[in-house]
Image (cartoon, rainbow, N blue to C red):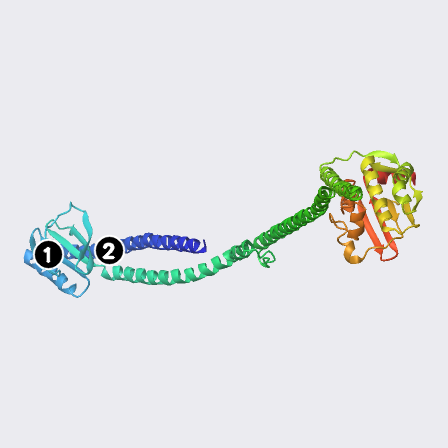
């Protein structure tokens, strides 16, 4: 593109320059011819006037004769023989005085009308002449044909044109250098963008354009870098999503394969254990347990998938009633480990989808129950702040390490995989909880200390929730 712009600009410059030079040279040439004709006519008028006066003077004398006039005219011819002004004086077709070479003389004489002068420009060999023919004043018989050499004017014009052409050629060369520098400066940002785009197309998404000069180029570079940042972020998101999906598929395959393998093994045991009631009972119980795991897994996956298209209809609920319902719903699970649930509510209302909120807090309390030791306590509390409502679940269980805290929200991830599988869990609980919190535009913070316990705080910041807190305070 730069070469095309360079070639086009240079061609346009050459055409304009030499086109203008052609027009100017023609005008200069015409001026030179006009100047030569003017000088030739001035010389003709001067010579014609002088000759006419001398002829009048001789004609007024009593002893005049045609021979005396002829001698006078020859004298004029001799005096002008060494100048660039040549002329012929003749009487009709008889030459009386001649200072013009025979090959320069007009072959056919054209006599102008009285008091008129014939002017023409001619070239003979390498010389240019202005030819004038006219009748000598006060004389009816004598004519002057003159040649005025204007070769010096034409040569001067040629020298000027030669110099201008030479200057033009040098100017074209200098212009091409300057043009190349200007185009390089103009196209540098575009070349930089092209180079960076090529690198990006090859997978180097870290490269950026660095242009400091030129407001337009700098702005273009900024927008290009912004576009590259967006592209890089989108690609990173897609890579993370792809990796997450692949991990999900791998985990799902693993989760499904384990119970199905067990079911298959116990089914073979049933076939081979004919008549052995204990073996049949054991195999049947395990088949039911593993089938329950598969059913729970499928239900949780369907529930997790349905929430992505779920629209929240915010309604007002009494927070104390919600906490009491959670306590009652988790009673059987907690009773197995003799775990107490203590409620400390310092808020009045909560806004959201009651079914999702119940599922959220029941899941969190059940997780806390699984992580807690026997005969321990779980604390369910609510606190209304100026800009949010915080509901917390605190247990006295084994706690979670920092490394595991970063992965705990991933689908199928378990802190204690052996215990979770034994309890029928698939590792989808916290993933579902995170989805529910996101649907309510809230935030879930998990804090944990190994061997001391875990605290999960859910913060609701919806406009209705904040307005209700402001009204009640």
Q: Position of residue 130 (x, y in %)?
A: 20, 55
Q: Residue 303 vs residue 170: left or right?
A: right
Q: Nearer the viewer, residue 102 or 302?
A: 302
Tell me which residue sits at (89%, 41%) in the image. Answer: 332
**Label 1: how many residues lie within 10 Å, few (<14), some (14-19) or many (20+)?**
few
Task: Find the residue positioned furthest to the front.
Answer: 275
Q: Position of residue 258 (x, y in %)?
A: 71, 47
Q: Quadrant where the C terminus lies?
A: top right
Q: Nearer the viewer, residue 176 or 251?
A: 251
Task: Find the residue positioned furthest to the bottom.
Answer: 82
Q: Residue 417 vs residue 230: left or right?
A: right
The residue indicated by pointer 2 is 42
Q: Nearer the viewer, residue 51 or 430?
A: 430
Tell me which residue sits at (39%, 52%) in the image. Answer: 12
The residue indicated by pointer 1 is 61
Q: Nearer the viewer, residue 295 or 127?
A: 295
Q: Is label 1 in a helix, a strand or a loop?
A: loop
Q: Position of residue 264 (x, y in %)?
A: 70, 44
Q: Is residue 382 something one can see in this rendering?
A: no
Q: Give the quarter of the image for residue 352.
A: top right
């Amino acid at each position: 593109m730069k070469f095309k712009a360079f070639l086009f600009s240079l061609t346009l410059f050459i055409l304009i320059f030499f086109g203008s030079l052609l027009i100017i040279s023609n005008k200069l040439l015409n001026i030179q011819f006009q100047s030569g004709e003017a000088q030739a006519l001035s010389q003709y008028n001067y010579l014609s006037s002088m000759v006419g006066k001398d002829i009048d003077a001789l004609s007024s004398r009593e002893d005049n004769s045609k021979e005396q006039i002829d001698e006078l005219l020859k004298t004029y011819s001799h005096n002008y023989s060494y100048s660039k002004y040549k002329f012929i004086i003749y009487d009709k077709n008889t030459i009386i005085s001649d200072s013009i070479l025979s090959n320069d003389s007009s072959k056919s004489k054209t006599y102008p009308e009285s008091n008129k002068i014939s002017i023409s420009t001619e070239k003979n060999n390498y010389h240019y002449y202005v030819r004038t023919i006219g009748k000598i004043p006060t004389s009816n018989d004598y004519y002057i044909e003159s040649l005025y050499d204007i070769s010096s004017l034409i040569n001067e014009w040629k020298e000027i044109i030669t110099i201008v052409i030479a200057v033009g050629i040098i100017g074209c060369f200098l212009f091409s250098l300057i043009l190349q520098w200007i185009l390089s400066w103009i196209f540098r940002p575009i070349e930089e963008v092209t180079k960076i785009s090529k690198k990006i197309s090859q997978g180097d998404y870290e490269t950026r354009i660095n242009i400091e000069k030129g407001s337009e180029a700098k702005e273009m570079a900024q927008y290009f870098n912004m576009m590259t940042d967006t592209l890089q972020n989108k690609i990173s998101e897609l890579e993370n999503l792809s990796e997450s999906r692949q991990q999900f598929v791998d985990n799902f395959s693993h989760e499904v394969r384990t119970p199905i393998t067990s079911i298959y093994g116990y089914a073979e045991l049933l076939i081979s254990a004919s008549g052995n009631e204990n073996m049949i009972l054991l195999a049947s119980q395990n088949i039911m347990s593993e089938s329950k795991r598969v059913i729970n897994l499928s239900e949780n996956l369907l529930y997790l998938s349905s929430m992505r298209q779920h629209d929240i209809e915010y309604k007002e609920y009494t927070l104390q009633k919600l906490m009491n319902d959670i306590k009652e719903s988790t009673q059987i699970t907690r009773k197995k480990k003799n775990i107490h649930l203590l409620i400390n509510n310092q808020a009045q209302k909560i806004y959201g989808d009651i079914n999702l909120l119940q599922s959220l807090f029941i899941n969190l309390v059940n997780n806390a129950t699984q992580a807690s030791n026997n005969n321990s306590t779980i604390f369910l509390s609510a606190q209304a702040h100026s800009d949010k409502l915080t509901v917390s679940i605190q247990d006295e269980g084994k706690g979670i390490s920092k490394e595991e805290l970063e992965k705990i929200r991933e689908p199928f991830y378990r802190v204690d995989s052996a215990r979770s599988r034994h309890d029928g869990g698939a590792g989808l609980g916290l993933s579902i909880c995170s989805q529910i919190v996101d649907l309510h535009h809230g935030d879930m913070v998990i804090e944990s200390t190994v061997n001391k316990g875990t605290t999960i705080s859910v913060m609701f910041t919806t406009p209705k929730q904040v307005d209700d807190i402001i009204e009640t305070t």
